[in-house]
Image: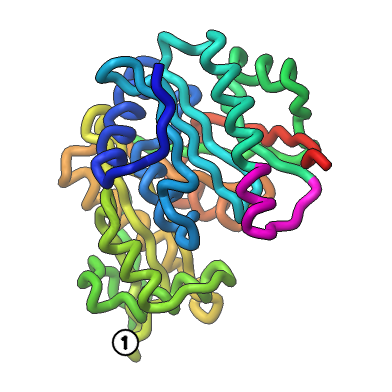
Amino acid sequence: MERRTSRRDSDVALLQAFNAAATAETGGCGFVHPGDIPHRLFNGNKLFDPAEVLTVWEAGDRIAAWVLVGPSHRGFDAQVRPDLHGTDLERKVLVYAEHRTTELMRHHGIDGQRIETEAYRCDTTRTELLVELGWCLAPEPPWVVNRIRLDGLEEPDVPDGYTVRAARGVEEAAALAAVHAASFGSTWTPETYRKVMQSPGYEREFVVEAADGALAAFTVTWHDHVNRTGLFEPVGTHPEHRRRGLGKAMLLFGMREMRASGMQHATVVNEGRNVASAALYRSAGFAQWHLLDVYTKPLPR
């Protein structure tokens, strides 16, 4: 078994294939959508070198596991091949992930009193192992993976003065950076957003354009062709354009595009305490599929 850092762009496609195969075997219990991998690597970790945050375990020519640390989020994702689930390798991967997260937080001067990771509630092997390793279930609502079958979809009801369309590419990086930053209160520049759009694995982006040409909402869609399941991640609406039905119209538009691309289902995730997001996804027809609980551990002194 070899452990290595990410050293090539082709790792993204390898990990996406790994997660697609694992999802097909497990029904999605315990494995993030393949689209989450480039999203978390290049968007969530936009300030970090992929070689610093991504670690891969290989046995021969097959991936056995991977860990993606999110130093700014004070946590990590850890995925282990289904046939190795619950083995000593999974234990070693989780211990490594904990130490690597702590190491990178300290190296980059990121404060915090705890680190965290999420675990699918259906994956009792993982949750029991986390508890055995000293992790505690956080007293907060779980993250929710929502899913919808892409048939019998509503027609998008786009309010007057707005247009839903596909993003035009890197030429709109500045406008996309602005709506992303406004939607989430995050920091984006045209250059950092352009880098995300040009990163390995990046797929389709849809926007809602207002009458004045400004972007009012956006979402990126990802496609798992093995399981014929699309993902919306992220989904955001500018504060000045909320409560007008733009998010729902954009999702319905995107779902039709996913169906045209051969997808049978779509998924989207909301934080448990985010009531507005949960309501939006229910209004678009999504229903709860999986729950992810947060587990925490005090940051070592």
Q: In the figure, 1 relative to 34: above or below?
A: above
Q: Residue 132: give x, y in percent of width and height.
A: 73, 16
Q: Quadrant of the N terminus?
A: top left
Residue found at x 39% / y 22%: 2
Q: Is residue 108 magenta?
A: yes
Is residue 199 toward the left or the right of residue 5 in the image? left
Q: Residue 220: give x, y in percent of width and height.
A: 34, 57
Camera sees residue 173: yes
Q: How many marks?
A: 1
Please name whichever residue, 253 or 269, is drawn nearer the observer in this view of the structure: 269
Residue found at x 49% / y 49%: 281
Mark 1 — residue? 213
Q: Residue 7: give x, y in percent of width and height.
A: 33, 43
Please name whichever residue, 89 or 170, is drawn nearer the observer in this view of the structure: 89
Give the amino acid type for the residue marked by disc 1 in the picture: Gly
Q: Residue furthest right?
A: 301
Q: Residue 261: give x, y in percent of width and height.
A: 16, 44
Q: Is residue 239 magenta?
A: no
The residues colored magenta run: 102-113
Q: Residue furthest bottom?
A: 212
Camera sees residue 151: no
Please name whichever residue, 94 or 3, is drawn nearer the observer in this view of the structure: 3
Q: Secondary structure at mark 1?
A: loop
